[in-house]
Amino acid sequence: MFSPVCAPGRMVEFPGYSLSGVLASYFFLLLTVKHQEKLQTERASLKVIGPSQPILVQVGEDIQLTRYLSPKTNAQSTEVRWLRSLRYPAVHVHMDGDHVAGEQMSEYRGRTSLVSNTIHEGRLTPQIHKARTPDDGQYRCLFEEDGVYQEASLDGRVAGKDSMFWIQHPGAEDGAKQLLCTSDGWFPPPHVQWRDPGGRTMPWGSAALRQGSRGPFHVESLLLVTGCSVASVTCSISNPPG
């Protein structure tokens, strides 16, 4: 009787394909998907952080609007915007490694730059050069990558050390000469001092401080003068120490 010989099993292969190649492709695709999911999770967990205290500078100094990405992420090829109230136009726009001047507010053109040697560490520091009183207020930092947005705000305070002030003569009261010293653009609330011709501090009648919405202070101080030359009286306005 003829007995069939059992041959060992054999893998069936299709022309141009191999099981090992198909498995390798499958695992490569799986790893790619896992990697993309991990990146998406990491981007979603990114936060824009920084000090909560206002950034205080004097008129004429540079404002550094520093914010950080946490965890540390190379932001060189991402889109980062520093805004006031609107997304467009912006204070400064960094996109794909370059400054986008065409999207910048006219009042900031030629006045901003980005500290580029720390952006690969996730430290985002645009600078506004030669601060002016209108630069005072809130700024927003908007970070975007692959459709994921993160935002943080910070306050830039411009103190009016170099603000102009005026002494006026609004009238007289009971024979005394009345002087009014006024000044704009101060932050924080300043100190006011009147001095006589000898440099001595003079007592003064009243002072008023007015502040706009999140903006600097307007100062008015009233002095009644008797027995000395009005032309020799001086009004001094300064920020508190520290």
Image (cartoon, helix red, strand yellow):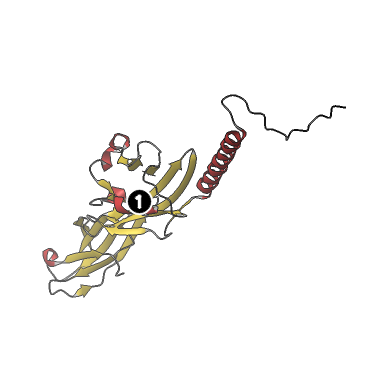
What residue does disc 1 label?
119
Please indicate, yes or no, whether residue 175 appears anywhere in the rendered image: no
Q: x, y (%) of residue 7?
A: 74, 33
In the rendered image, residue 212, in percent from the top left (x then y), is placed at 37, 51
Q: Nearer the viewer, residue 100 or 111?
A: 100
Is residue 14 shown left or right of residue 53? right
Residue 170 location, x and y as percent? Answer: 22, 56
Picture quarter containing residue 202? bottom left
Closest to the observer, 50 or 8: 8
User: Which residue reaches farthest front?
Assistant: 1
- Give the residue type that dot 1 points to: Ile
Q: Residue shown at 31%/65% (left/top)?
A: 206
Does residue 106 appear left or right of residue 30 in this picture? Answer: left
Residue at 36% x, 54% y is 66
| Other-residue count near label 1 (Cα within 10 Å), few / some / many at <14 / 14–19 / ≥20 | many
Q: How many marks?
A: 1
Which one is in front, 22 or 103? 22
Which residue is drawn at the image coordinates 32% and 59% (left, top)?
56
169 or 29: nearer the viewer: 29
Q: Position of residue 67 (x, y in %)?
A: 39, 54
Q: Residue furthest right?
A: 1
Q: Quadrant of the N terminus?
A: top right
Q: Taking 109 as reference, is 60 above or below it?
A: below
Q: Quadrant of the C terminus?
A: bottom left
Task: Work out which residue is located at the far top of the displayed protein and give it.
Answer: 15
Q: Quadrant of residue 233?
A: bottom left
In the rendered structure, the answer to whether residue 203 lies left or right of residue 155 reads left
Q: Secondary structure at mark 1?
A: helix
Q: Quadrant of residue 204?
A: bottom left
Residue at 78 percent across and 33 percent down: it is: 6
Residue 106 visible in this rendered orientation of the protein: yes
